[in-house]
Image: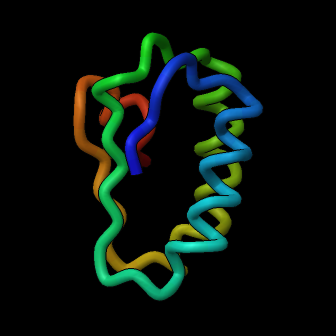
Amino acid sequence: MKLYGDFDGSSAHELLNALIAHGTNAHQIFIDTDDLDTVHPFGQEVFHKNLSTIIKQFINLNFIGKYKNSLAI
């Protein structure tokens, strides 16, 4: 998955929904953050809070790119 633009609360929910809908049967998931302009603190908080409850559904979730450390837990 390649992310673009600003990562805010709405973006966090969109990414979480996409992961749930398409990622549960994947062997590996790569989330590329290179084309994000900014990661808003609220978006990061929403993503981390909700991802922590579903992370066990994903075998290998890999964040790559310049904002990988902002989104990975």
- Which one is in front, 58 or 49? 58
Residue found at the very far left of the displayed protein: 65
Colour style of the rendered protein structure: rainbow
- Residue 29: % across, % down: 35, 66
Residue at the (60%, 56%) spot, across then down: 51
Q: For residue 21, what is the image quadrant?
A: bottom right
- Residue at image position (31%, 57%) is 30
User: Which residue appears at 32% of the width and 33% of the height?
Assistant: 69
34 to 37, vertically: above or below: below
Count of labels in the image: 0
Q: Position of residue 46 (x, y in %)?
A: 71, 37
Q: Position of residue 31 (x, y in %)?
A: 36, 49
Q: Nearer the viewer, residue 6 or 68?
A: 6
User: Could you say where residue 11 lies in the image, as x and y percent from the top left?
Assistant: 66, 34
- Indicate whether 68 appears above or below 29: above
**Rendered view: 18 above or below 1:** below
Quick one: 30 or 49, which is closer to the camera? 30
Instruction: Say left or right for 6 vs 59.
Output: right
What residue sits 53% from the left and 81% below the top?
Answer: 24
Judged left or right of residue 22, residue 63 is: left
Q: Quadrant of residue 28?
A: bottom left
Find the residue positioned furthest to the bottom: 25
